[in-house]
């Protein structure tokens, strides 16, 4: 994707769209996206409402755009680090925990948004200029539209073949469990007034893992 193929006009449009995205993230550092108005985003991004709706037909489309960028980054990390099975899943979940510390409103906002949908939203394609600005030197890989389901399925298939997945748990069942853990852990933490996102993720992921038969039980340790 040579530099000359992307015009200054395309790059300017991409910068405006990314300004909206970054402004939205800033505004949900400590509150839900439902509490943020389009006018707030436009003011922070220094764009007009017309510009906002040129890129996003509705406000919640910004959340889907966030998911697209976030998942692409994580899958590029996984590929670069050659992570497989539960190591890949743990990387994904650890990054959620890290980002939740600085953007506390993002996951609750996503959960609220997804609760009103039928099915997981399709990830939107990115324009070449957006890819250039977001993923320099990784443009070809970043152009592929990611799928959370496919990422989970591949990791659980790898885990099963490596003997990491708990016996008796099918790959499709494990994928459903991962979606439950990915989103449901935040609801669990709120119900229990907890803040340890990573700890909650780790505790639930252990339920899907196979443990060596020679690991002593709690009872045998006390004998």
Image (spheres, rainbow, N blue to C red):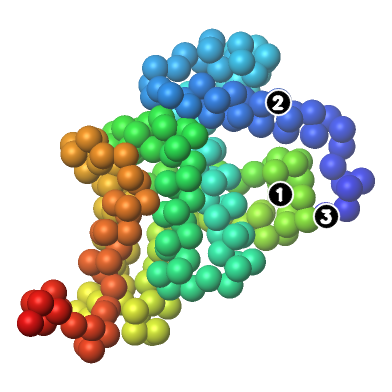
Few, some or many residues within 10 Å of mark 3 (<14, 14–19, 20+): few
Q: Say which element carries label 2.
A: helix
* Sequence-first disc among 2 and 1: 2
Q: Disc 3, disc 1: CB below 8 Å?
A: no
Residue at point 56%, 59% (across, down): 75
| Quarter containing the C terminus | bottom left
Of residues 154 and 201, which is closer to you in this image? 201
Q: Is residue 80 visible?
A: yes
Residue where numbered disc 3 is placed: 1
Residue at the far front in the pictured view: 223
Of residues 129 and 44, which is closer to you in this image? 44
Residue at point 59%, 24% (across, down): 23
Instruction: Measure the C-alpha gap from mark 2 to mark 1.
Output: 16 Å
Q: Disc 2, disc 1: CB below 8 Å?
A: no
Q: Say which element carries label 1.
A: loop
Residue at point 33%, 45% (across, down): 196
Of residues 65 and 43, which is closer to you in this image? 43
Residue where numbered disc 1 is placed: 135
Locate residue 160, reporting x and y percent: 35, 80
Residue where numbered disc 2 is placed: 16
Q: Nearer the viewer, mark 3 or mark 1?
A: 1
């Amino acid at each position: 994707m040579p530099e000359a193929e992307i015009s200054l006009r395309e790059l300017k449009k991409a910068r405006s769209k990314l300004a909206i995205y970054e402004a939205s993230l800033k505004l949900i550092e400590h509150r839900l996206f439902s509490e943020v108005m389009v006018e707030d985003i436009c003011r922070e991004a220094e764009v007009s409402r017309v510009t906002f709706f040129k890129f996003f037909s509705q406000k919640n489309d910004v959340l889907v755009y966030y998911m697209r960028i976030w998942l692409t980054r994580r899958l590029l990390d996984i590929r670069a680090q050659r992570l497989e099975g539960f190591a890949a899943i743990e990387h994904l979940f650890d990054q959620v925990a890290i980002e939740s510390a600085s953007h506390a409103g993002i996951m609750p906002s996503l959960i609220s948004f997804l609760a009103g949908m039928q099915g997981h939203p399709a990830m939107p394609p990115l324009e070449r200029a957006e890819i250039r600005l977001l993923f320099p030197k990784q443009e070809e890989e970043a152009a592929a539209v990611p799928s959370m389901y496919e990422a989970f399925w591949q990791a659980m298939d790898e885990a099963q073949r490596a003997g990491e997945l708990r016996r008796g748990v099918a790959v499709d069942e494990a994928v459903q469990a991962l979606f439950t853990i990915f989103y449901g852990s935040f609801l669990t933490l709120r119900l229990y007034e907890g803040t340890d996102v990573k700890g909650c993720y780790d505790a639930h992921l252990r339920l899907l893992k196979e443990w060596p038969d020679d690991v002593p039980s709690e009872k045998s340790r006390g004998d």
